[in-house]
Image (cartoon, helix red, strand yellow):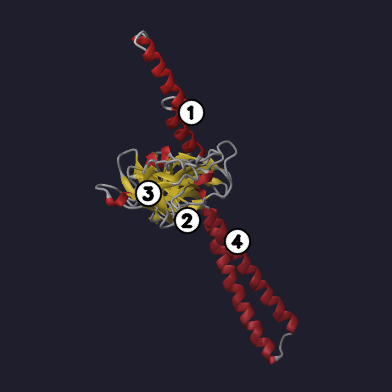
């Protein structure tokens, strides 16, 4: 033993210890137990963490009556216009008016020279008086049986014929005078005193300017929103402003523009507004229940429809189509949103239909405005 070297003894000792360790069966390398634990955890089912929900702000929609102001460019026109013509032949004895003169209904505008026609009236009146006396005497004679019924009937017939001739003579005299059919302004006079005229010869043109008519056109889309009797505001090219009323809407569209002519009657008692002047017409359309929304919340649906995003009761986002009827400084005026709808006003571009989100009432925030509220 003494001759055995020290390193030999150490080697034998290590060999004996190693054999004993192997005999225990726990010969896995360092870290193998940790790896086994990881494999065990990986095999067990693990629930993924819940994704964070998008936050959006909403406001409750409130419908209110809204009357859109429709703006139309137009021109003024006379309420009435006509050309007066001679009704019988003759020489013009007198023209009673000048261009630009105001004339009243029934006023004589022109008279023809015709003394012979006045004489015809006098003769017809005398004949009527004579035959009236004859007819009266014959009636008395018929009552006493001195004349026959045939004689009495002939007298009555002669009287009726004389009366008819008198009416014709008076009508001929009446045709010698040309009267104004309605209050107007004389726009032009085409003849001079002493001129010979035939029936149908143009004598003068007249126009009625009270009321003055502002004429414009409305589109197919706006036709249903304008009605006869609607109030209007008219701004004329000379700076005059006046209130008017829609008096007529044509029901046949123009072939070229597919628009419908509309007439606005405006009082013009002082005749300061002439025919043919430019006019800007603002028409108050019929009231409609609508909601005013910020322009920023308008979005497009999958089919290209214009609308807004709303928040359902289950906190899911959905799309609601709307119809824009006007653009105002306060926002877009739209229809199609029921009262109480939760309209997404912030974050609408970050969510999609059916997405589950967290909704916050925007009206609770400072300065927030709900759709439909001013």
Instruction: Name the N-terminal-most of marks 1 and 4.
Output: 1
Name the image quarter holding the N terminus: top left
Secondary structure under badge 4? Answer: helix
* Residue denoted by label 3: 359
Instruction: Name the N-terminal-most of marks 2 and 4.
Output: 4
What's the distance in space between the residues labelled 3 and 4, CA to CA?
A: 92 Å
The structure residue drawn at horizontal position 48% and vertical position 37%, both measured from the top left corner, is 40
List x then y, in percent, for residue 304: 53, 38
List x then y, in percent, for residue 151: 73, 80
Is residue 82 or residue 174 the one in the foreground? Answer: 82
* 240 relative to 164, above or below: above
Is residue 227 or residue 210 the one in the foreground? Answer: 227
* Residue denoted by label 2: 228
List x then y, in percent, for residue 282: 38, 46
* Residue denoted by label 4: 168
What's the distance in space between the residues labelled 2 and 4, CA to CA?
A: 45 Å
| Residue 99 visible in the shown view | no
Q: Tell me, yes or no, whether the two marked residues, 3 and 4, touch with CB atoms within 8 Å.
A: no
Q: Nearer the viewer, mark 3 or mark 4?
A: 3
Instruction: Name the N-terminal-most of marks 3 and 4.
Output: 4
Secondary structure under badge 2? Answer: loop
Q: Which mark is residue 23?
A: 1
Is residue 309 or residue 260 the one in the foreground? Answer: 309
Q: Nearer the viewer, mark 2 or mark 1?
A: 1
What's the distance in space between the residues labelled 1 and 3, CA to CA?
A: 68 Å
Instruction: Name the N-terminal-most of marks 2 and 3.
Output: 2
Crowdedness near tag 1: few (<14), some (14–19) or many (≥20) residues, C-alpha within 10 Å: few
Q: Nearer the viewer, mark 1 or mark 4?
A: 1
What's the distance in space between the residues labelled 2 and 1, CA to CA?
A: 112 Å
Is residue 366 or residue 244 the one in the foreground? Answer: 366
Image side of residue 272 versus residue 72, left or right: left
């Amino acid at each position: 033993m003494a001759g055995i070297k020290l390193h030999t003894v150490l080697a034998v000792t290590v060999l004996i210890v190693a054999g004993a360790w192997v005999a225990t069966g726990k010969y896995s390398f360092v870290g193998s137990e940790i790896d086994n634990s990881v494999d065990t955890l990986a095999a067990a089912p693990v629930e993924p963490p819940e994704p964070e929900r998008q936050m959006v702000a909403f406001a409750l929609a409130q419908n209110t009556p809204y009357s859109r102001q429709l703006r139309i460019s137009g021109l003024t026109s006379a309420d009435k216009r006509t050309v007066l013509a001679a009704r019988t032949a003759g020489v013009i004895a007198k023209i009673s008016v000048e261009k630009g003169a105001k004339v009243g209904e029934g006023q004589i505008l022109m008279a023809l020279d015709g003394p012979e026609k006045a004489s015809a009236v006098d003769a017809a009146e005398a004949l009527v008086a004579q035959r009236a006396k004859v007819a009266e005497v014959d009636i008395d004679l018929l009552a006493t049986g001195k004349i026959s019924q045939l004689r009495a009937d002939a007298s009555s017939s002669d009287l009726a014929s004389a009366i008819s001739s008198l009416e014709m003579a008076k009508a001929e005299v009446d045709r010698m005078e040309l009267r104004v059919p309605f209050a107007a302004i004389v726009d032009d006079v085409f003849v001079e005193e002493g001129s010979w005229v035939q029936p149908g010869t143009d004598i003068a043109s007249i126009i009625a300017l009270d009321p003055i008519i502002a004429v414009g056109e409305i589109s197919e889309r706006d036709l249903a929103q304008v009605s006869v009797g609607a109030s209007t505001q008219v701004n004329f090219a000379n700076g005059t402003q006046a209130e008017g009323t829609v008096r007529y809407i044509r029901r046949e569209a123009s072939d070229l523009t597919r628009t419908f002519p509309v007439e606005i009657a405006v009082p013009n008692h002082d005749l300061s507004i002439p025919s043919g002047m430019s006019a800007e017409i603002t028409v108050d359309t019929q009231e409609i229940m609508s909601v005013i929304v910020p322009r920023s919340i308008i979005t497009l649906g999958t089919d290209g429809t214009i609308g807004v995003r709303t928040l359902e009761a289950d906190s899911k986002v959905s799309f609601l189509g709307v119809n824009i009827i006007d653009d105002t400084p306060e926002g877009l005026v739209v229809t199609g949103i029921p009262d109480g709808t939760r309209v997404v006003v912030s974050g609408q571009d970050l969510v999609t239909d059916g997405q589950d989100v967290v909704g916050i009432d925007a009206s609770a925030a400072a300065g927030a405005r709900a759709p439909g509220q001013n």
